[in-house]
Amino acid sequence: MDSARDLKVFISTGESICHECGQKLGRSAWISLAKGERGALCMSCADLDHLAFLAPGDAALTRRARKHSTLSAVVLKWSRTRHRYERQGVLVEELGLSRAEVECLADGDARERRRAREAERRTAFDREYVEKFALRVRELFPSCPVGGEHTIAEHACLKYSGRVGRSAAAKDLDERAVRLAVVARIRHIETPYDQLLAAGQDRDEARRAIESQVHCVLSRWAQFVPRAT
């Protein structure tokens, strides 16, 4: 990807508030910058919260993960001593990272990192809450692909992420909050939304471009289709 066109995520050094959802992000929040107003966006509102962080240290793994990711972003942090933004790592798609790790399996360090990342991911879930969230997804969208409710729930409910599943409304299994989590999943998986962002299209324009596709999938998933006996 051309570095000049790379999507950029910044680790803030001061207090910040998401321009879109109004959430107080605090210090060291991961933010994107909205076009025009130049306001901060949390990862969820920037539609980047589905990406996995890959720290520097293995150039081959980073290169392959980015190659296999439709959408990726560079993570930057301001250095007070050097007075410049310095690269902290990259955000890549989970599938792209997994494919890169498979290609690097000959490297023992890569295998160890993958085991550590999977162990960390397992501890980052409140399993009971995830199960309840998944059941609510299945209740509202009975024709969601098999297993899809758990994928949506795990993504939305990851601890400390600031994702939609961590909101108070989501914890009450509010229909709108659950629907937002499902919509986010559909955008990234069922439409060319990530490709549009990767090509440099404005986020709002990209959302409008795939809006009808999202509604079509939502309607299909919301229909109850009796299973053959």
Image: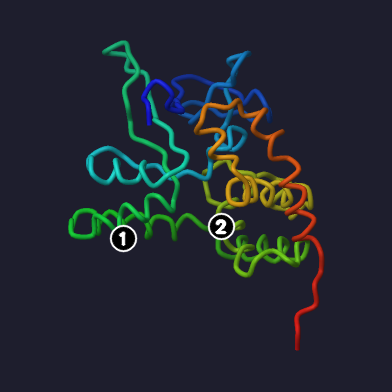
Nearer-N-terminus badge (2/1): 1
Q: Residue at x 72, y 47 (%)?
A: 214
Report x, y in % for residue 121: 43, 56
Identify the image quadrant of the N terminus: top left
Q: Residue 102, labelled with which disc?
A: none
Secondary element at tag 2: helix
Name the residue type under label 2: Glu
Report x, y in % for residue 8: 45, 26
Q: Residue 154, labelled with which disc?
A: 2
Q: Residue at x 58, y 15 (%)?
A: 38
Report x, y in % for residue 67: 36, 43
Secondary element at tag 1: helix
Left or right of 89, for residue 170: right
Name the residue type under label 1: Arg
Q: Residues within 10 Å of mark 2 (few under 14, many from 20)?
A: many
Viewer-side residue, 93 vs 55: 93
Viewer-side residue, 79 vs 149: 149
Tell me which corner region of the image, top left, top right, bottom left or bottom right, holds residue 19: top right
Report x, y in % for residue 50: 52, 45
Q: Residue at x 69, y 63 (%)?
A: 144
Tell me which corner region of the image, top left, top right, bottom left or bottom right, holds residue 146: bottom right
Q: Residue at x 58, y 46 (%)?
A: 188
User: Label 1, on which residue?
Assistant: 115
